[in-house]
Image (cartoon, helix red, strand yellow):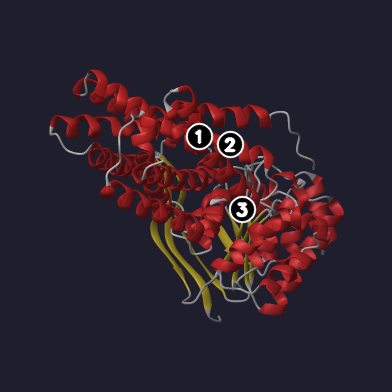
Amino acid sequence: MTHADLASLGLELSMAVAAGLVGCFAVMRRMTLAADALSHVALPGIGLVLLLRVEPLWGALAMLIAGTVLIWGLERRTRLSIDAVVGVVFSAALAIGSLITSGEELIDALFGGAGKVSGVEVLVGAATAALVVAFVLWGRDRLVVALVSPDIARTSGIPVERLDLAFLVAFALTVALGLRFLGVLLMGSLIIIPAATAKRLAGSLRSMFAIAIAIAVASVVGGAWLGAAFHGQRGPLAILVAAAFFFGSLFYRRNG
Amino acid sequence: MGTPALEVDRLTVRFGDATVLDGLTFSVEAGTTVGVIGPNGAGKTILFRALIGALPSEGTVRWAPGTRIGYVPQKLDIERDLPITARELLLAKAKIARADRAEVDHAFAHVGLPPAAAGKPIGRLSGGQFQRLLVAFALIGRPNVLLFDEPTANVDEAGQESLGETIHKIQGEHGLTLLLISHDLSVVYRYATSVLCLGHGLPCFGPPHEMLTGERLAELYGSPLHNHVHLHVHDAR
C-alpha cells in the first residue's frame, strides 16, 4: 500500500466516523429520507465547477452549504416539514445538475469515482471530519433535548433554530467529505444505514454512537477490501456491506 | 401586590385569519400559582408556547430578570425505539443547566420514579412514568418558574394525587411561581392563588372563589355545567 493509498483510507475512515455520529441524530430526528435527499443538492455545484475546471469538492461544498441555508430558511419561513422542503430543493438541484453535467462526469458525481486524492484534499477532509465529530460530541446534550422537544429545549436556554442550522451544516459537511468516494447518490446512505442499524440494536445513546461508528468504519474497510479483491467499485460495495449489517440486525430482538 | 414574575400585556396570537388569543393582559406575582382553565381549543397550550417564545405573537411578554423556566408540555410524540435512556435525558439537562449529578438523582427520586426506570429507553417508559420524567427534567437546574401543561395527564389516579402533592410541596419549599394548565378543577381550586379563564366570552383573571363559580364556568365552557364538575369543586374544598 502506498502513502497515497494510506492517506486515502485514512480520509475515508475519518469520514466514516463523522457519518456514523451525524447519522445518529439524523435518524433520531426522523430526517432519514430528507437527509438522504440533501446529499443530492451537491450535484449542480459539481456540474458548475466541472464546467469551470475547478476541483469538484469546492463546488459541491459551496452548493451543499447554500442548499442547507436555503432549506433551513424555507422551513422556518413556511413552517412546512423538512421533508417537503428538502424534497422540492433536492428535485430542483438534481434537475439543474443533470442539465449541466455530462456523461462520465455525471456518473462519477452520482456514484463516486476512483483516482488519487491530493494532499490538500486529505488535510481539508481530515480537518472537516474532526470539526463535525467535535460538533456532535460537544452539542450532544443540546441535540438530545431538542430532538425530544424543541419547546423544552427553548426553556432550557437552547437556541433551537441556530442548533438546527448548525446540525444541517454538519450534515452537509459530512456529505461533502464522502462525495469523492461515494458520490451524491450513495453518500447519504453511509450516513443513514449505520445509524438506522444502531438504532435497532442500541439501548442507550452512548451505545448507539459506538455501534453506528463501528458499522460505518467496517463498511468502508469492507468496501475497500471487496473492491481490491474483486476489482469492483469500493463505494457501492461499502454501501452493500452497510446494508448487510442492517438486514442482519433485523434478526436481533431487543429486550425491554 | 408583590414582585411580578411575569407581565403579559395585550398578547395576541394569530394563525392566518384565526385569532387564538386576542389582547390577553395579566400579571403573575412571584411565588404564586396560576391555574389556567378553559375548554379544548381555547388556546391554553398556545398561551404557554407564546410565553416561552415558541410562537410568533403580538403584545408584550415580560419575565422578571433571572427567570429560569421548567416546562412540562402536554404530550410528546416519542418513538418507542429511541435509544436515549431516562438518565441520559436528565444528565443532558443537568449539563446544559450546569447542575451537578446529585440533582439528577434527587429529581428522579422526588417524582417517585423507580430506580430501574433510569436505565430504560424513554420510549419504553409507560405514559405515567414518562410524564414523571418530564417533571423531573423540569426541576433540574433550579428553575424559579414552572409551566406545567396537564402534568398529571396519563398518570393513574393514585399517582395524580402524589404527583400533585409533590409539585405543590416543591413549589412551597422553593417559593416557585407555578402556571398550571389543568382540566381538573378540583386541583385548580385546591392549589391556585389565581385563575386565568380562556374560552367562550372574554378572558377572565382572578381568585379561584370568584372564577370557579357555576355561572362563570357555564359561560366559560359554553354550556351548563354537569353536576360532577360542581361536586368536584366542592369536594376539593
- Tag 2 secondary structure: helix
- Rounded to the nearest angstrom, the CA distance separating label 2 from label 1 is 9 Å
- The x and y percentages for residue A234 are 44, 29
> Could you tell me which chain the residue with mark 3 belongs to?
B
Q: Nearer the viewer, mark 2 or mark 3?
A: 2
> Could you tell me which chain the residue with mark 2 belongs to?
A
- The x and y percentages for residue B56 are 40, 51
Badge 2 and badge 3 both on one subunit: no
Q: Looking at the picture, does residue B50 appear above or below residue B223?
A: below
- Rounded to the nearest angstrom, the CA distance separating label 2 from label 3 is 28 Å
Q: Nearer the viewer, mark 2 or mark 1?
A: 2
> Could you tell me which chain the residue with mark 1 belongs to?
A
Number of dots carrying numbers: 3
What residue is disc 1 on? Answer: A32
Q: Residue type at mark 2: give it.
A: Ala
Q: Is residue A120 left or right of residue B89?
A: left
Q: Residue type at mark 1: give it.
A: Thr
Q: Which mark is residue B73?
A: 3
CB contact under 8 Å: marks 2 and 1: yes
Name the residue at 56% across, 73% down.
B98
What residue is disc 2 on? Answer: A196
Name the residue at 70% across, 59% down.
B87
Residue A83 visible in image: no
Q: Looking at the picture, does residue B145 appear above or below residue A172?
A: below
Q: Residue type at mark 3: give it.
A: Pro
- Tag 3 secondary structure: loop
Badge 2 and badge 1 both on one subunit: yes
The quarter of the picture where residue A85 lies is top left
Q: Looking at the picture, does residue A230 appear above or below residue A29?
A: above
CB contact under 8 Å: marks 2 and 3: no
Judging depth in this view, the residue of B169 and A163 nearest the camera is A163
